[in-house]
Image (cartoon, rainbow, N blue to C red):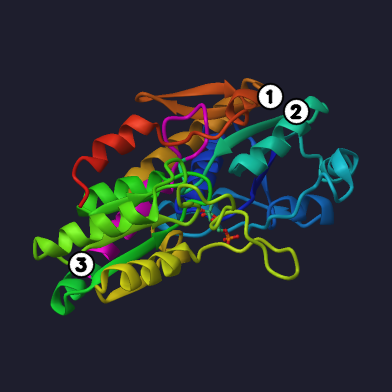
Amino acid sequence: MKIGLLTAGGDCPGLNAVIRGVVLKGDRIYDHEFVGIKDGFRGLVEDIVSPLPRQRVRGLSKVGGTILGTSRVSPITNGGTERVKEVMARHEIDALVTIGGEGTLTVARMFADDGIPVVGVPKTIDNDLSATDRTFGFDTAVSIATESIDRLRTTGEAHGRCMVVEVMGRNVGWIALHAGIASGAHAILIPEVPVSREQVCEWAQQAQDRGRAPVVVVAEGFTFAGDGTQVGSDRTDEFGRKLLGGIGEQITRLVEERTGIETRNTTLGHLQRGGVPSSYDRVLATRFGTAAVDAVSAKKWGTMVALQGIDIVNVNLRDATSALKTVPRDQWDEAAILFG
Ligand code: F6P
């Protein structure tokens, strides 16, 4: 079989390890041939396809980013599935492996519904995909955020300041929750649990009163209780483009004004997505890659590889894209007992 690989949406540590896993197992066990599709779905509609022999994936499991490039171009509004079928036919591509988050996998599901042979691989640092216990990239992002918060704490303590740290997570708070617990934050604010301004200031004050430098970790999609508008995820600029971030700055001003504690904000941004994947993410991504090529070989079209417990399984793309996996309230409650 000739198989086309693409990575779409935001990048994520571990993408290259998936590519390597697919190509090495596909070459060694099934004798498949591979082509790389450049920049996600853009390469598929603009016909940018090149051979992907096993020599191109050598040593890739530890390399960040994606050798195929990525974009958020949608094929649905750029020629649709007819165009995709045309490009696949021109290159004699029998099947696709699409590696991406919710948007990419939703497109893959539409492809499958339209008769395009496709298998999905879930990726996102946000860990918000249903039907898989974990996505690769999350472990790396949490480690980077935790190390950053540890560093911010020591400078906060030196100056007696409150340190606010904004992490990624426009819809869910998994990174904030895990990095916040790991670093012993005095407040963790996530989109799933709106909290009042008064409560945030009270937690900062309590930590300060005990002689600690308060540390507040906030996910970019967090909203204060009672606020009608989304501050993190729904804000747009004058061109209608989505504005991410900004909530960390707001909390910084709030805490400083209401408590008098000198406060600083750090927005970690894309640092959380860059650099080498953790060993956990390399292993998960490699397992996803080898399982994806098994699924292609078994013609399990319209499915996605997923982690359930310690096993890699195949699930229907429909189940994987039906709803986001949010942080359950009781997990946040467990963490909140230690706030302040
Ligand atoms: O990959 C998901 C995510 O990391 C979100 O947490 C964040 O809001 C978004 O990507 C940022 O995307 P971009 O790279 O397009 O700015």
Residue at (21% x, 40% y) in the render = 337
Q: Which mark is residue 112?
A: 2
* Label located before the other in sequence (3 or 1): 3
Q: Which mark is residue 335?
A: none
Element on which disc 2 rests: helix
Q: Amino acid at mark 3?
A: Arg
* Label located before the other in sequence (1 or 2): 2
In this view, 161 is above or below 171:
below
Q: Which residue is mark 1?
A: 301
Outermost residue on the left side: it is 211
In this view, 15 is above or below 302:
below
Please provide the residue range marked out in magenta.
128-151
Asked whether 137 falls inside the magenta stretch, the response is yes
Q: Nearer the viewer, residue 239 or 148?
A: 239
Provide residue 118's location: percent of width, then percent of height: 70, 32
Label total for image: 3
Residue at (47% x, 62% y) in the render = 247
Q: Nearer the viewer, residue 240 or 101?
A: 240
Left/right placement of residue 240 relative to residue 249 reads right
Q: Is residue 277 at all visible to an observer of this figure?
A: no
Circle 1/circle 2 CB separation < 8 Å: yes
Residue 94: quadrant of the picture? top right
Q: Amino acid at mark 1?
A: Trp
Q: Which residue is mark 3?
A: 153
